Amino acid sequence: MTAEIKSAIREEALRLGFDAVGFAAARLAPEARAHLKEFLARGYHGDMGWLAARAEERGDPQTLWREAQSVVVLGANYGPEADPLAMLAQRDRGAISVYAQGHDYHDILKARLKALARWIDGRWSGALKVFVDTAPVMEKPLAAAAALGWQGKHTNLVSRDFGSWLFLGEIYLALALPPDTAETDHCGACRRCLDACPTGAFPAPYRLEARRCISYLTIEHKGHIEAALRPLIGNRIYGCDDCLAVCPWNKFARVSAEPGFRSREALAAPSLAALAKLDDAGFRALFKGSAVKRIGRNRFIRNVLIAIGNSGERGLAAAAEALLDDPSPLVRATAVWALRRLADAGAVAALRTAHLPRESDDAVRAEWQA
């Protein structure tokens, strides 16, 4: 009977538009819990205090929800149409991570997950809960246990069928179902993902130092990005796809069939000069319905200014100059850094005189003096 239930759930999930479906027990392997504990103990999570705050629930599905017996893990393919790394050569343009170029995947996945949950609830008794990357759930170990793929040396999920490009969601069930056979690791001796990282964020295979990761720095980190790391970010203004894009298993990837995951033209190769002009209202309008919106205008413009400073395009110095008196001290300080990278010393000295730091602008003052 349980095999029939699994088969029916799988069939309905695929009908609803999911591309991968698997089943795992509502528990994590001891090594997954140990890895989380080590990650937090080393401080690799940086500003992501929410990881530590709910670590116990994250490490044990039954601590998060004591009734949980099984986990249905769902994957949705967001395979890109073009090579994400090609954008890195367009220095006057901003590179936005593939996952954020379309509609916010949380909205799309949550609607599908809720539809599947309603369908399950109408056929078998027992409570259930739906999760999409917003609760303390260790999605990738659960996905590996449910045979959707394996965690590669870059710590992300790798799929035989979809390469690096799977969004994940989960339904916790109070219903006990037999788990699928976990996928084995197929990375072998390959280390392309480790070698591709611009900032050296992998201290060892299967270990990520998030504080050096460009995705962390441009999305999660709220303050000033360490000066030594800024040149390594290049023109990446929201996230980074390098370790994902170089994986050899992407030869089996396919372009996503979901229109909502496709790249919006305005976000595929946006002009840095145009992005630098965005005020809060303009930022919200451009990124309405996008995952980018959640970091807010000031952090985003910080990222844009770093890309401008890395561009080598002297013509972009004017875009940085225009932000020297921005209301945000984070933006003002990064504008100084970008300007110093692009303008000659005489112009920088003149601008420094014209734009004296405010009394509390320690970061801005430090950038002028660097």
Image (tube, grey):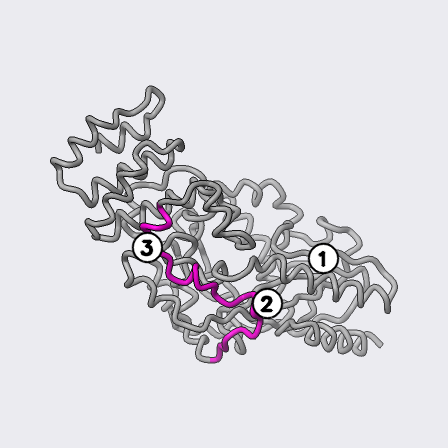
Element type where label 1 sits in the image:
strand
Report the side of 282 relative to 257 (left or right). left
The mark closer to the camera, 3 or 2, is 3
Name the residue: 35% across, 48% down.
304
Identify which amino acid the numbered label 1 is placed on.
Answer: Val
Span highlighted in magenta in the image? 252-276
State the residue in front, 129 or 316.
Answer: 316
Q: Earlier in the sequence, mark 3 or mark 2?
A: 2
State the residue in front, 147 or 219.
Answer: 219
Residue extending farthest to the top is 359
Q: Quadrant of residue 323?
A: top left
Q: Earlier in the sequence, mark 3 or mark 1?
A: 1
Q: Which residue is mark 3?
A: 235
Name the residue: 70% across, 76% down.
15
Q: Which residue is mark 1?
A: 130
Question: Which quadrant is the C terminus positioned in?
Answer: top left
Element type where label 3 sits in the image:
loop
Whole-angstrom CA distance, mark 3 to mark 1, is 36 Å
Whole-angstrom CA distance, mark 3 to mark 2, is 32 Å
Report the side of 15 relative to 19 (left or right). right
The mark closer to the camera, 2 or 1, is 1
Q: Quadrant of residue 174?
A: bottom right
Residue 178: percent from left, percent from top: 75, 71
Q: Are marks 3 and 1 in contact (CB under 8 Å)?
A: no
Identify which amino acid the numbered label 3 is placed on.
Answer: Asn
Question: Which quadrant is the N terminus positioned in?
Answer: bottom right
Numbered mark located on residue 144 in the image: 2
The mark closer to the camera, 3 or 1, is 3
Q: Is residue 267 magenta?
A: yes
